Image (cartoon, grey):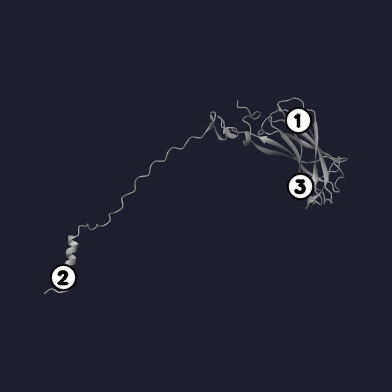
Amino acid sequence: MSSLRDIRKLRSKTRLLESTDPVPGPIGTTGEKGDKGDKGDTGSTGAKGDTPALGSETDYTEFESDGTMLMVGKATVFNDIVCPLIVRTTGVNRPALATFVGNILQYVFEVDDYAEIEAIELPHCWKEGSEIEIHIHWATGGLNDGTPRKVKWEIEYAYAGMSGGAFTSTTTDSAEGTIAANEAAGTLHYTTIDTFTPTGYTIGTQMVMRVKRIAGTGTEPAADPFALAVGVHIEQDTIGSRERGSKANT
């Protein structure tokens, strides 16, 4: 006679066989990933006219048909022509060398002292017809007292075009710089003296200049200042010129 336990096992097997729910089979393997689509073509570089350019409609750098780079609008840059002071003569109203810092000597300018600047040339990168700024780098000659003091500089200049012709009449202008109260000796200053636009002149224009210290407003500083260099700021629209004497595309 079958035991009660055997009867229960038999009934359990019978229920499994009579079940209508299918038994899930094993999970299949993952299919292969499809191929990646092709990347679209890169758009072409924009142009100003027929030449490639970078920037906005009004401010851009372009490469012209001969490969020359040209900067237009706000893409132009500024550069500095540095004019060191080299005094070749001595005497009345000529600046003298004095100790500036360490063993380095520079020229001290008393009131009415002056020095000629060796001739300079407007370089081939200059944007023809643009404004030119003349400035001076100078430094205090000693510790200032408790009152601000003025130092006044004068520039006299003339210029002539490379292609010939007489030099212009000289132009003279001046500007003051302020030494702050209790300012330390050897403090560097930058003073713009004049700006002008040589309309009609081109690269290669020659400039001659003279710098002079003149009486300033109020009491002069107890220690005379050092003049270090005169500088000429120019606007630049190319890195040079196409020809030795011309920026034109000939």
- Look at mark 1 in the image and give the residue it sits on: 159
Q: Work out how far the residue at label 2 is from the one at label 1, CA to CA, in angstroms.
A: 125 Å
65 lies left or right of 215: left
Q: Of the residues shown, which amino acid type is indicated by label 1?
A: Tyr
Q: Work out how far the residue at label 2 is from the one at label 3, CA to CA, in angstroms.
A: 111 Å
Instruction: Please tell me which of labels 1 and 3 falls first in the chain.
Output: 1
40 lies left or right of 23: right
Which tag is nearer the camera, tag 1 or tag 3? 3
Q: Of the residues shown, which amino acid type is indicated by label 3?
A: Leu
246 lies left or right of 229: left
Q: Position of residue 91 (x, y in %)?
A: 87, 41
Contact between marks 2 and 3 (CB within 8 A): the answer is no
Contact between marks 2 and 1 (CB within 8 A): the answer is no
Which element type, helix, strand or loop, lies under badge 2?
helix
Q: Of the numbered discs in the image, which one, if any, rests on residue 188? A: 3
- Frontmost residue, 48 versus 248: 48
Q: Work out how far the residue at label 1 is from the one at label 3, CA to CA, in angstroms.
A: 29 Å
Instruction: Please tell me which of labels 2 and 3 falls first in the chain.
Output: 2
125 lies left or right of 115: left
Q: Of the residues shown, which amino acid type is indicated by label 2?
A: Ile
- Frontmost residue, 91 versus 185: 185
Q: Position of residue 210 (x, y in %)?
A: 80, 36
Give the residue at x 70% y 39%.
Answer: 80
Instruction: Please tell me which of labels 2 and 1 falls first in the chain.
Output: 2
Specify the quadrant that holds the N terminus.
bottom left
- Frontmost residue, 141 versus 20: 20
Q: Position of residue 225 (x, y in %)?
A: 82, 46
- Look at mark 2 in the image and give the residue it sits on: 7
